[in-house]
Image: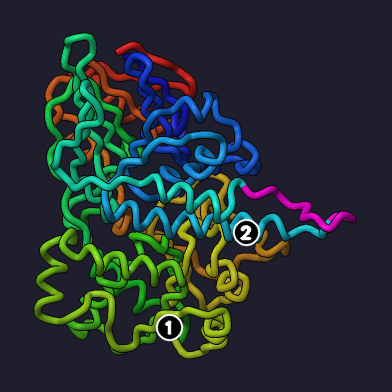
């Protein structure tokens, strides 16, 4: 049995791991690697024949885990994609949105003399997304699924995002049973809307994410306290606006629920809130559809107060005209818009009109990969390029990790310790400092740890 790491190896994005059991090939995740400026061109080159892959296991919907599936299909993959029901629904939304982003990028530059777009060629189109969705086969949590006579799969809830799962594979390898856990992205306890990560079983091998290796989440303040503080500073003490870049899927729903709780308790005077993301509206419907999978706090709130995602002074913005009207709304307000790393989406319009506004605060609530506009702002860049224009940064830039969907260093160590004494722990999906910090901590606890390079293969 051979395991090769083709993505998220010594970096965060582009999760993709190839497990070969004899002649049977399983790809665990197939995400977009967007840490390079030329990521569309880079993602077209698979280091294996897509047609040779028998099966894909998708841990969750986020685009760095799912976003290159249509390219895989376009280039010859014709097998099934196994995932949980919410993951199938949320991935569909994200993939169609990716097509729109590709098409916008393709049309940014002037047409050639032949009338073709001269921007980056789209990685895939709507047809390829539909072909990909046709391959989804959904599996419930904690229900062993027999892939073939030698391999079975169990999805274990890990929080992080609705439907997110660790994939536990039990394999008969020439008469020897072996278990391997792919954690996907591990969530954190007591996160709004989402369930706590469940303990993983004992296994022989672990492939774990390491996003927050060496880092601890803020403990001296609750999310409610921090949001009240930021809103007070940005919208009440001064008549300004608070812009919160948030991923439409997952982060936005948790943030809206947290704000609902704050205003229901009357901790702040009423303030207009805009959720400017059609994709967030679609994703919220998925959360309603799979309401049986949200956490008990959200279920209890629904029973006593009603819909977690609807309350007074909250408006969901659908059309571009409505979005432009938000830009012209001059009373204090909160604008929640995607994308979280500022790489596209309507958030760029709000930044364009507010980055030079002294009365605007931009609050980051999640991770921003290197090279993204969000990363540049968080790094203190005094000038950024938005919509092909160099702009001075006068807005206040703030950040909190209290809505990060990733477990911190201790959460990661706890998850890995649940798996007993695996023969080897592979760390992926992290920046170098995080990988090394987590690796060192695990080695001190007696674990055999590898931090694989891209393309590195291991016989297990």
In the figure, 49 relative to 252: above or below? above
In the figure, 180 relative to 267: above or below? above
Q: Report the magenta residues as a range.
A: 112-122
Q: Secondary structure at mark 1?
A: strand
List the residue tagged with mark 1. Answer: 333
Residue closest to the eye, 32 or 417: 32
Q: Are marks 2 and 1 in contact (CB under 8 Å)?
A: no
Rendered image quadrant of residue 343: bottom right
Q: From mark 2 to mark 1, how far is it between C-alphas?
A: 25 Å
* Place of residue 18 in the rendered image (x, y in percent of width and height, measured from the top left): 40, 25
* Place of residue 19 in the rendered image (x, y in percent of width and height, measured from the top left): 36, 23
Quadrant in the picture for the C terminus: top left
User: Does the magenta portion include 141?
Assistant: no
Callout 2 crowding tier (Cα within 10 Å): few <14, some 14–19, many ≥20? few
Residue at 46 percent of width and 34 percent of height: 11
List the residue tagged with mark 2. Answer: 382
Rendered image quadrant of residue 292: bottom left
Earlier in the chain: of badge 2 and badge 1, it is: 1
Residue at 28 percent of width and 75 percent of height: 309
């Amino acid at each position: 049995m051979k395991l090769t790491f083709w993505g998220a190896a010594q970096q965060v994005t582009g999760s993709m791991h190839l497990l070969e059991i004899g002649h049977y090939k399983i790809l665990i995740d197939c995400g977009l690697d967007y840490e390079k400026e030329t990521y569309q061109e880079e993602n077209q080159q698979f280091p294996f024949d897509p047609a040779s892959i028998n099966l894909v296991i998708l841990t969750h919907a986020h685009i760095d885990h799912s976003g290159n599936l249509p390219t895989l299909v376009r280039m010859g993959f014709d097998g099934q994609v196994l995932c949980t029901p919410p993951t199938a629904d949320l991935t569909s939304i994200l993939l169609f949105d990716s097509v729109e982003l590709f098409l916008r990028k393709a049309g940014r530059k002037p047409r050639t003399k032949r009338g073709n777009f001269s921007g980056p060629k789209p990685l895939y189109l709507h047809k390829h997304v539909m072909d990909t969705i046709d391959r989804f086969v959904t599996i419930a949590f904690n229900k062993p699924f027999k892939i073939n006579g030698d391999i079975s799969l169990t999805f274990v809830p890990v929080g992080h995002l609705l439907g997110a799962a660790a994939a536990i594979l039990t394999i008969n390898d020439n008469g020897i049973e072996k278990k391997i856990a792919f954690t996907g992205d591990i969530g954190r306890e007591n996160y709004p809307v989402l369930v706590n990560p469940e303990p993983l079983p004992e296994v022989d091998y672990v492939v774990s994410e390491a996003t927050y290796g060496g880092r601890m989440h803020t403990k001296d303040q609750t999310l409610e306290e921090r949001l009240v503080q930021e809103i007070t500073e940005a919208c009440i003490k001064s008549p300004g606006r608070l812009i919160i870049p948030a991923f439409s899927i997952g982060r936005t729903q948790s943030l809206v629920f947290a704000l609902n709780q704050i205003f229901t308790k009357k901790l702040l005077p009423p303030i207009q809130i805009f959720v400017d993301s059609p994709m967030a509206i679609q994703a919220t419907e998925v959360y309603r559809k799979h309401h049986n999978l949200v956490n008990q706090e959200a279920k209890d709130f629904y029973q006593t107060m009603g819909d977690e995602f609807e309350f007074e002074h909250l408006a969901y913005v659908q059309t571009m005209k409505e979005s432009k009207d938000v830009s012209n709304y001059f009373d204090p307000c909160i604008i929640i818009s995607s994308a979280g790393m500022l790489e596209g989406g309507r958030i760029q319009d709000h930044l364009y009109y507010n980055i030079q506004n002294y009365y605007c605060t931009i609050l980051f609530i999640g991770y921003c990969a290197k090279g993204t506009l969000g990363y540049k702002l968080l790094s203190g860049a005094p000038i950024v390029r938005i919509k092909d224009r160099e702009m001075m940064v006068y807005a206040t830039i703030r950040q909190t990790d209290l809505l990060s969907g990733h477990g911190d260093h201790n959460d990661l160590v706890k998850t890995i310790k649940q798996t007993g004494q695996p023969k080897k722990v592979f760390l992926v999906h992290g920046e170098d400092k995080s990988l090394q910090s987590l690796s060192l901590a695990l080695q001190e606890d007696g674990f055999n740890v590898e931090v694989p390079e891209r393309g590195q293969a291991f016989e297990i």
